[in-house]
Image: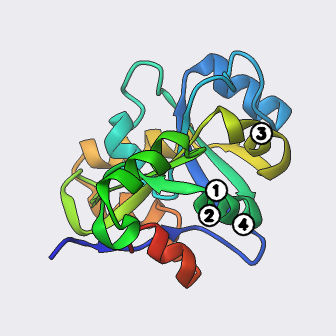
Amino acid sequence: MSAAREVRADFDRATIVMYQAYSDAIADVAVKQQKFGPPFSVGRMTWIKPSLLWLMHRSNFGRKSGQERTLAVRIKRSGWEEALGAAVLTGYEPKAHGSPDAWRKAFESAPVHVQWDPERTLRGAGLPHDSIQVGLSRAVIQRFVDDWTVSITDLTPLVQKLRKHLDDGRADQATRLLPKESVYPVPPELARRLGM
């Protein structure tokens, strides 16, 4: 049996928060303009993640080169669900795709890719439920930038605080600073498409 798949996120009635890690050059423009702009590229796939801890695992709490800055990008739920509705899983799954051939064809033309990876604890250990990563291709990035993004917040100071607490052995204090993420209600037709 594979791990449980849930979308856990910080969301309200109209919006949902996605986390991304970038270089100073991209983050400075995004925070100042409240919108992504050059040197951010709309020409290559960008991955958005609703799990802060998964991104922390990925960026090593902002220590990885080019991922020093952590941004909380609040987007419209309508945009999020539009992305999920256009998504194809990065790997073949019988329940979601029927045949390997059907999956391959769908994947090659999909504007959005979805990958599931084990959710992480503060210390980076895998948890028994999976976390979603959503890759937006060139076909939809412009919509993400122009239509879906509501606000962009620089979480780098919070990430530095979390890292310091962890380095000093104060995981409980770090845990208290984490944004509240709860289970997002994925519509049933999308859940099947996403292999949930």
Is the residue marked by circle 3 packed among few (<14), some (14-19), or many (20+) residues within 10 Å?
Answer: some
Q: Quadrant of the N terminus?
A: bottom left
Which residue corresponds to mark 4?
77
Q: Quadrant of residue 6?
A: bottom left
Q: Position of residue 113 (x, y in %)?
A: 49, 48
- Give, as a three-letter code, the residue at label 1: Ala
* Spatial CA span between label 2 and label 3: 18 Å
- Give, as a three-letter code, the residue at label 2: Gly
SS state under label 2: helix
Which residue corresponds to mark 1?
83
Q: How many marks?
A: 4
Q: Is residue 53 visible?
A: no
Which residue corresponds to mark 3?
145
Residue at x-position 76% and y-position 24%: 29
Viewer-closest of 115 and 165: 115
SS state under label 3: helix
Which residue corresponds to mark 2?
85
Q: Position of residue 20 (x, y in %)?
A: 54, 41
Q: Is residue 122 visible?
A: yes
Viewer-closest of 87 and 6: 87
* Spatial CA span between label 4 and label 3: 14 Å
* Spatial CA span between label 2 and label 4: 12 Å
* Spatial CA span between label 1 and label 3: 13 Å
